[in-house]
Image (cartoon, rainbow, N blue to C red):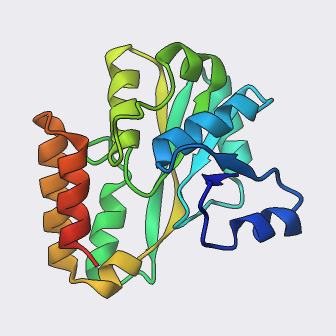
Amino acid sequence: MANASATTDDSRQVCNDYDCLFLDTPHCSRAAQMNYAAQYAQGNILIFVHADVLVPKNMFSHIEKATLMGNQYGWFSYRFDPPGILRRINSFLTKYDGAFAGGGDQCIFIDKTIFDQLGGYDERYCIMEDFELTRRVKQNNIAYKLIDEPATVSARKYTENSYMKVNLVNLKALRMFITGEDPVDIHKMYNEALS
């Protein structure tokens, strides 16, 4: 687990409790933290899990199957907890490789060699870093798999804001990303719009 140097949560204790390596990263951004942690990984496949995500119990077997089929990158569909009627629509759409695929609150896997060849996460992205990596994977014709075995994502954003507001903010962030706006501006808009 990588975490920012000035951590204010109990990440260090969680790592101690579960015998995980805790890394104090020099920079406080998800992209930088994930790149830093990847340097210490010893396996052939890297798995990046967003803090709001619970992975499927059979995650490893799904990733193994996907990689044996030649996929070097991939992510899982997801469902929200608690689900809610409208959130079920969003969950259903994560089964498809559309504009929102490969980003957001995710569980992503990637072959370490491919990750290194791509230069890892682009640290200019303080938000949308997973969308940006997925875009490069697709541009480089790297085989990938959207695994239709849902990870469970916290619905915290939806319970603290309205369903419509979260979706509109997500759409705006995606539009800004696609049109090449500065990630700092996207991050500022997102943080100001959602509590």
User: Left or right: where does residue 44 sit relative to residue 67?
Assistant: right
Q: Quadrant of residue 4?
A: bottom right
> Is 13 placed above or below 129 here?
below
Q: Is residue 147 visible?
A: no
How far across and down, in percent of the image, does residue 135 sit? 32, 29
Q: Nearer the viewer, residue 136 or 176?
A: 176
Q: Residue at x 17, y 60 (%)?
A: 189
Q: Position of residue 106 (x, y in %)?
A: 48, 53
Left or right: 190 as drawn, with respect to 118: left
Where is residue 78 drawn, in percent x and y?
Answer: 46, 61
Residue at coordinates 15% horizontally, 37% vertically from top-left?
A: 178
Work out whether 156 lies above or below 12: below
Q: Is residue 140 visible?
A: yes
Q: Residue at x 25, y 83 (%)?
A: 161
Q: Picture quarter containing residue 17?
A: bottom right
Picture mark count = 0
Q: Position of residue 88 (x, y in %)?
A: 33, 73
Left or right, residue 82 beside residue 21: left
Q: Is residue 120 above or below residue 108?
A: above
* Quadrant the C terminus occupies: bottom left
Who's the residue at 71% across and 61% down the image?
Answer: 57
